Image (cartoon, coloured by chain):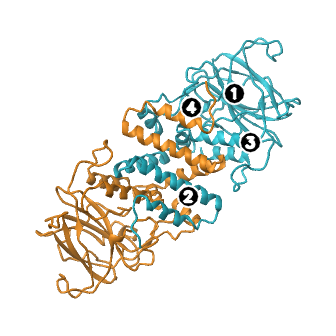
Chain colours: A orange, B cyan
Amino acid sequence: MRTLNENTITDAVLEQLSGTPNPRFKQIIEAAVRHLHAFAREVNLTPQEWLEGIRFFTEVGQKCTPYRQEFILLSDTLGLSALVGLMSDKRTPGIHTDTSLLGPFYRQNSPRFKLGDSIAKKTKGKEVVLWGRVQDANGRGIPHASIEVWQTDELGDYDMQRPAAEEMDLRGTLESDSEGRYYFRSVVPAGYSIPMDGPVGEMIRAQNRHGLRPSHVHYLIGAPGYKELVTALYIAGDPHIESDTVFGVTDSLVVKVSDPEPASPFPNLPQIKYDFTLSAAGKDEGSGRVGADPSQITKNVAAVH
Amino acid sequence: MRTLNENTITDAVLEQLSGTPNPRFKQIIEAAVRHLHAFAREVNLTPQEWLEGIRFFTEVGQKCTPYRQEFILLSDTLGLSALVGLMSDKRTPGIHTDTSLLGPFYRQNSPRFKLGDSIAKKTKGKEVVLWGRVQDANGRGIPHASIEVWQTDELGDYDMQRPAAEEMDLRGTLESDSEGRYYFRSVVPAGYSIPMDGPVGEMIRAQNRHGLRPSHVHYLIGAPGYKELVTALYIAGDPHIESDTVFGVTDSLVVKVSDPEPASPFPNLPQIKYDFTLSAAGKDEGSGRVGADPSQITKNVAAVH
């Protein structure tokens, strides 16, 4: 028998975890316990504060529905989602476009479009052409890559936030041509607020944060033999580009809405030009445990929404 | 504009938190972010593992009902609840009985009993007398202290786990006499398993832990001018007393079921004899923020169940 104190209790917990058979799960849960206890000790967490934490996490869980994932929102606003993406990028060898958050507004099976089509049906935004290439690390075009794109309208709303939520708009699936080129028309999206009517919104208000995301266009790009790329392009000049509430902006993903150029497929339209570089599909990085097929990850994320 | 990496992102998040007006909340959320990020970096958390975590927390939140608090169970099984209690004990000045977890089976407004009554109605366990004194740090009896007690039956079930869950049994509220003495009859409780049919149970199985708690009797003792005491007495000899799955056992709270003594109020019954020492109610310790009335804490815990 031993008397536990605020330091020895951590070892007592680790002792009970020592028989965890899966080595990766053991590593993760042991680290989680050590950091959780170190946090509680550092702030000398009181029973009342602990209870407020229990209440908060319970509310976050209970706010989740098939159309809303409040725990992902919490992870996003605390920078954890971005951190996980940055670490994954770093483990991916070779030249490749940086990733960015998938976010909660991805939908599977968006309508198919032909190159040159407009994905904007019900919107009054400023029309632009988005074009460039999907290429490999050596700059060779990747033919017939699947390009899923989704964005807000000029008011900052995704289709699923409109009254007719089931009607898809401002999203679509295209295919690059035989040389890896893609081009389609849309409108300049507006920035927007994360959902503020739940416990995460309460947290954001208690932190005096604006809760806004800068204007951006989401991309999910895949091709056989390449690692699926989840990313977004951020529109330069948005007032919140330096203070994205979910930390998704990276220099390399900031684009300008620039004047037309003669080579443009729509030489009369302002343009957002960007080349995406995919890395070759390799063995699963990092975990040594989950055979993480990235497209499966995306489907799983879609499934928890 | 700056490019975030897996190290600089933590500072970017802390920068967004820097305007948090409540200094204690700022301290807690900043520490939480630092430790959360340090955990993710230490284990190099992959997107797939992150998603498994999101799923797990979502399920824990969705398992909570007015009669079940899965987040408290998670906190208990990871040793966080015990750690918070140990730190609170340490901050409480002077001599006092150690605290132990309130647990998820407390009920407000349990039936009132007179000293000497039995709190066990529907049970076939071995009868014992539980007696002793409620006293202050100087050993002076505290008259008319409120003593709430609750325990399992000889099968390891609390009343609310029986088919007639609404019928209270093996729990009650007593009052110490004018000299602080208390005595009542009950049966020796059996140890039991924590609820294993939820995500926490899954976690416990994946860790090859038994999920059992040793036999114990819960106490919640209060008197005007004293800090409310939430504790439990653990029965010596239980096979799981060294491996309580929620880390509630402390040396000073282990009691023997011993032979009767002549001074016992029931000199024919085996006895569990224990004196409880309450500390004087002081200013709220620790947080500098919440005016934590401990009895309010208990009520709040009861309310989130």
Find residue B92 and name its label. 3
- Which of A244 and A73 lies nearest the eye of the viewer? A244
Q: Residue at x 60, y 46 (%)?
A: A41
Question: Which label sits on residue B161?
Answer: 4
Does residue A244 appear to the left or right of A285 in the view shown? right
Co-location on one chain, circles 1 and 3: yes
Sequence-first disc among 1 and 3:
3
Which residue position holds label 1? B252
* Labels 1 and 4 positioned on one and the same chain: yes
Q: Are marks 3 and 4 on the same chain?
A: yes
| Residue A150 x/y as whole percent | 31, 69
For disc 2, the chain is B
* Sequence-wise first label, 1 or 4: 4
Q: Amino acid at mark 2?
A: Glu
Q: What amino acid is at disc 4?
A: Gln
Residue A183 in sight from this viewpoint: yes
